[in-house]
Image: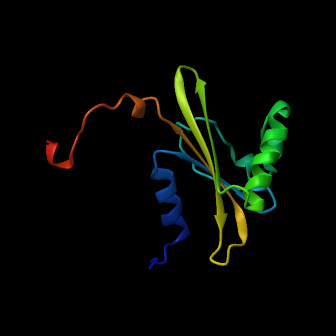
Amino acid sequence: MLEKFSTETLEAIFDTLPVDLTFVDETDTIRYYSKDDDRIFRRTPAVIGKKVQDCHPKESLHKVNQVVSDLKSGKKDRAEFWIDLKGRKIYIRYFTVRDKTGKYLGTLEVTQDITDIQKIKGENRLLDMK
């Protein structure tokens, strides 16, 4: 069961995660982004309330609309992409957010720099920690 959290606590949790989060609601409007100074794709408060389509280059707009359409319709529950950016490997995932009845609430974009993760070899167990 989920404990009730204040908005401030939830925002602090989201801002602590080692990923960038952006939430786009059911009307394609940006409602939230995690506020990390080291974000891969910088956001400013001015983005809140904008349509997601207005935040992407025109040449990729048809793809953005396709992803959003597939997630809304239930054709897909997630979409994943990765790109090389300034010598880093960036992993971008979009997840459908639905309520308990299955109603579409929006899309959560999760962006992560996985460059260092890809270099992991062997194990580093909790018991090995000094």
Quadrant containing the C terminus is: top left
Q: Is residue 90 above or below residue 31?
A: above
User: Could you say which is closer to the camera, residue 64 or residue 17?
Assistant: 64
| Picture quadrant where residue 28 is located | bottom right
Q: Is residue 106 left or right of residue 38?
A: right
Q: Is residue 46 above or below residue 123?
A: below
Q: Position of residue 6 (x, y in %)?
A: 51, 72
The figure's colour scheme reads: rainbow
Q: Residue at x 60, y 45 (%)?
A: 93
Q: Residue at x 69, y 55 (%)?
A: 76
- Residue situated furthest front in the rendering: 75
Q: Position of residue 25 (x, y in %)?
A: 74, 61
Q: Position of residue 67 (x, y in %)?
A: 75, 47
Quadrant containing the N terminus is: bottom left
Q: Residue at x 65, y 63 (%)?
A: 97
**What number of labels is visible?**
0
Q: Is residue 72 above or below residue 90?
A: below
- Residue situated furthest top in the rendering: 87
Q: Residue at x 23, y 40 (%)?
A: 124
Q: Position of residue 129 (x, y in %)?
A: 17, 43
